[in-house]
Image (cartoon, rainbow, N blue to C red):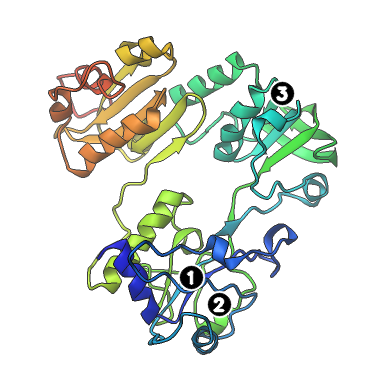
């Protein structure tokens, strides 16, 4: 079933439940949303989706059906299903932070109009780190405050060390192991971030504050319980491996369903539901979830890290090379970073990490090989174009140790 066919098929369902409603029942940032701007659009040559529906409260599935029948383009609907994609929102960490923080509302500022600022970034790494590069390179001063003892604390020590070195070389101040006690001022004007590190009081000053406190699903206060749709302790809609909720003919996808908070995962959720509606049997269990941190250079990983392999007592052989061994990086003058791969006893690739130029692209090559169950030797022995970044995989997999004694590394 093609995506275009699926768009047409949606006309047989009661509604596509898209919303930008925050946990307090209002619009995020106090801003109303044009439903047409957030709804998926029809593709050329197929029937477009009906207009997206935005409600502040869902009282019952029957109400959804009644509401949807009155919508433009709803002619001929059979009222057979509802889809929940309520996304997630960014909670504030504390009341004092709420007073200091002004939401950016997701709008980008053209760099030519970017003022020189002193940014203090606090919270989750993926949101902080992908923002700091552009700001630092406008000659703004950036300070990163981290409550954990290391940056990107879930990744391997060599990954954390490499990113820390990058920040140091970029002139970014990093404070780890720092607990925030209070914030003074207003972001956009002047802020002071007070904290404690190793028992010592710290103060970070800046003009702007980037508070990256993670995300929570937009499911509170919208009446899911009246539709018999259950949520878990974190507020995610309870779904099975086919993304069916606890109520008949209701599916949930993306952030609100507890899937990893990545756009590419939410899109795969859509494909799971699409194919199951068409009679297939797709599930979310066992799928690979890649990620890429868009620093400069990028950090990308698919499969296991060394730490995860060790924690789960999974033996592996380690191959690792510096990015300067990839000849293309020399022509680009971008030699920072490394490639590494974890190889199982049967020669399958069980993990791959890249920190370097075009890391996300080279990771995707390895991901395809992993999805196909290929042995590392097939990539090693493939003739790849010179000079390309992907050619570095030949060098990496030529560095896999021959011996495997059943122990880590």
Residue 177 drawn above or below residue 55: above
- The residue to which callout 1 is attached is 84
Q: Within 10 angstroms of label 1, few (less than 14), some, or many (20 or more) residues? A: many
The circle on residue 140 is 3
Between circles 1 and 2, the one closer to the viewer is 1
The circle on residue 344 is none
In the rendering, at what x and y percent does residue 298 appear? Answer: 46, 28
For image coordinates 18% across by 35% down, the residue present is 348
Residue 227 drawn above or below residue 222: below
Q: CA distance from mark 1 to mark 3?
A: 41 Å
Q: CA distance from mark 2 to mark 3?
A: 45 Å
- The residue to which callout 2 is attached is 224
Q: Which of the image's four quarters has the N terminus?
A: bottom left
Between circles 2 and 3, the one closer to the viewer is 3
| Nearer-N-terminus badge (2/3) | 3
For image coordinates 17% across by 29% down, the residue present is 376
- Please tell me in which quadrant of the rendered image residue 188 appears: top right
Horizontal arrangement in the rendering, residue 36 relative to residue 350 (left or right): right
Q: CA distance from mark 1 to mark 2?
A: 10 Å
- SS at mark 1 in the image: strand
For image coordinates 84% across by 41% down, the residue present is 186
Q: Within 10 angstroms of label 2, few (less than 14), some, or many (20 or more) residues? A: some
For the residue pair 207 and 149, the one nearer the viewer reads as: 207
- SS at mark 2 in the image: helix
Please indicate, yes or no, whether residue 156 appears anywhere in the rendered image. no
Whether the residues at callouts 2 and 3 have beta carbons within 8 Å, the answer is no
- SS at mark 3 in the image: loop
Q: Which of the image's four quarters has the C terminus?
A: top left
For image coordinates 34% across by 73% down, the residue present is 8
- Please tell me in which quadrant of the rendered image residue 225 appears: bottom right
Whether the residues at callouts 1 and 2 have beta carbons within 8 Å, the answer is yes
| Nearer-N-terminus badge (1/2) | 1
């Amino acid at each position: 079933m093609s995506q275009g066919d699926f768009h047409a098929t949606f006309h047989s369902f009661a509604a596509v439940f898209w919303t930008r409603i925050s946990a307090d029942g209002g619009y995020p940032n106090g801003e109303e949303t044009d439903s047409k701007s957030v709804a998926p659009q029809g593709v050329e040559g197929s029937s477009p989706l009906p207009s997206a529906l935005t409600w502040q409260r869902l009282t019952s599935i029957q109400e959804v059906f009644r509401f949807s029948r009155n919508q433009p383009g709803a002619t001929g609907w059979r009222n057979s299903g509802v889809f929940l994609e309520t996304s997630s929102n960014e909670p504030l960490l504390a009341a004092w932070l709420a007073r200091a923080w002004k939401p950016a509302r997701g709008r980008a500022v053209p760099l030519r109009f970017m003022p020189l600022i002193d940014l203090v970034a606090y919270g989750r790494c993926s949101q902080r780190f992908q923002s700091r590069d552009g700001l630092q390179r406008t000659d703004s001063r950036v300070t990163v405050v981290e409550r954990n003892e290391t940056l990107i604390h879930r990744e391997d020590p060599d990954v954390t060390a490499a990113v820390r070195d990058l920040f140091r070389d970029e002139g970014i101040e990093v404070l780890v192991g720092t607990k925030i006690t209070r914030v003074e001022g207003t972001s956009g004007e002047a802020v002071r971030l007070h904290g404690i590190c190793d028992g010592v009081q710290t103060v970070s000053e800046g003009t702007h504050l980037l508070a990256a406190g993670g995300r929570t699903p937009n499911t509170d206060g919208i009446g899911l319980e009246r539709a018999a749709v259950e949520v878990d302790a974190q507020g995610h809609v309870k779904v099975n491996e086919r993304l069916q909720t606890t109520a008949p003919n209701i599916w949930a996808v993306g952030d609100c369903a507890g899937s990893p908070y990545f756009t590419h995962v939410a899109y795969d959720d859509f494909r799971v539901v699409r194919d199951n509606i068409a009679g297939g049997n797709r599930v979310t269990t066992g799928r690979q979830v890649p990620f890429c941190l868009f620093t400069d250079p990028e950090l990308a990983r698919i499969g296991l890290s060394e730490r995860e392999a060790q924690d789960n007592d999974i033996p592996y052989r380690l191959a690792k090379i510096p990015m300067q061994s990839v000849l293309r990086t020399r022509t680009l003058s971008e030699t920072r970073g490394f490639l590494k791969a974890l190889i199982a006893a049967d020669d399958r690739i069980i993990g791959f990490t890249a920190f370097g130029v075009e890391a996300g692209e080279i990771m995707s090559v390895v991901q395809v090989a992993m999805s196909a169950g290929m042995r590392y030797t097939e990539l090693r022995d493939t003739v790849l174009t010179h000079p390309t970044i992907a050619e570095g995989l030949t060098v990496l997999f030529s560095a896999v140790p021959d011996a495997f004694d059943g122990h880590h590394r």
